[in-house]
Amino acid sequence: MAWGIACLVAIPLAGCAEPVPPLEPATITFACPDVDKGYYEELAQQFNEQYPHLTVELRSMSGGPLNDINTAGVNVLVVAPWAVGELQAEGAILNLDPFTEQDESFALSDFYPGTFELFSIEGRTWAVPGGLDVLVTFYNRDLFDQHGLPYPDVGWTWNDLLRSAVEIRDPDAGIYGYVTSGTTNEPSYLDAALLVYLHGGRLFDSLQAPTRTTFDDPLTVEALEWYADLYHEYDVAPTPKEARRTLAESKAYEQLAGEEVARTARASADEYIRWRTRF
């Protein structure tokens, strides 16, 4: 998932472009997720060293950029792509094109391909990419070696994943070919949505300004049927109940997070055990 940096309408214009120093010092209030505050504190210090007349005051967003956004008293904020449309419709954020056009150091090549378009509406830019969460799949090399399977590579397809998962699975031994992310009590199944978009399907007609769901899109249906078959047709992925039992009884967490976390996980498997996608 990508997130962007948006400037609210009330911000002094010097804060979003190569500034002409104001006659008086200025303070910019920057809202960011609480978990990322340390990261932005370092950036704010670097910014202040480059522009001594501007002070960045950080404000925490307890729920992160995905929750409801309170823009009161905020000049700049971290925002998710699907929140941009609402903020733009409310007239709460600035069109950044005038600032990027006059900034000679600004270059689209500095951004990961495809991320800049996530924050554009009707050809205008309302936020600039501020970061990208990269989701990865972990795999167990020992299991691949035991079954004589090649490791996943850049050219891997869904069929390659399925063939390997079927070969590796051994439910009686607590070994599954594929596991989703989340908690054992509440699996996230985010990977199902990711597969939909990887396959060319959609969950909504527009991420920025959705008006309807598109669950009947043929490509969406194909992707979700393939995902469901991992559980119901091929039995390569565990149900939440199977995952709780397997992880609570195994030594997986001693390998992944150390003995202390493993003991805590076993003490209350439903509440504490967390795992990421792997085969």
Image (tube, rainbow, N blue to C red):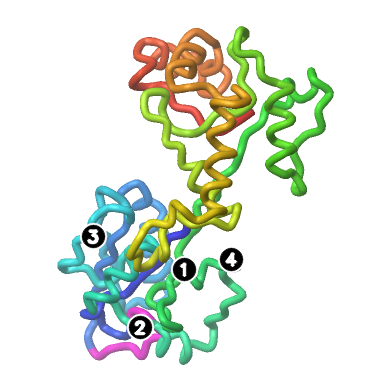
Dots 1, 2 in contact, CB < 8 A: no
- In the depicted structure, whether residue 270 falls above or below residue 52: above
Say if mark 3 contacts mark 2, CB within 8 Å.
Answer: no
Residue highlighted by disc 2: 95
**Residue linked to disc 1:** 118
- As helix, strand or loop, the secondary structure at mark 1 comes to helix
Mark found first going from the N terminus, 3 or 2: 3
Q: How crowded is mark 3: few (under 14 residues within 10 Å), some or many (20 or more)?
A: some
Q: Which residue is drawn at 15% across and 67% down?
A: 72
Q: Which amino acid does label 2 sit on?
A: Asn
Question: Answer yes or no: do the residues labelled 2 and 4 have beta carbons within 8 Å?
Answer: no
Q: Is residue 139 visible?
A: yes
Which is more N-terminal, label 4 or label 2?
Answer: 2
Can you give x and y, in whole percent of width and height, for residue 122 in the image? 42, 82
Highlighted magenta segment, given as a residue range = 15-23
Q: Real-space Cα distance between discs 2 and 4?
A: 21 Å
Residue that numbered label 3 is attached to:
69
Which corner quadrant holds the C terminus?
top right
For badge 4, the amino acid type reads Tyr
- CB atoms of marks 1 and 3 within 8 Å: no
Q: Which of 90 and 192 is in front in this view?
A: 192
Read off the residue under disc 4: 112
Q: Which residue is drawn at 57% across and 80% down?
A: 107
Badge 3 element:
loop
Image location (x, y in percent) of residue 8:
26, 75
Quadrant of residue 74 in the image?
Answer: bottom left
Query: Residue at position x 25%, y 48% from top?
Result: 62
Q: How far apart are marks 3 and 2 (CA)?
A: 19 Å
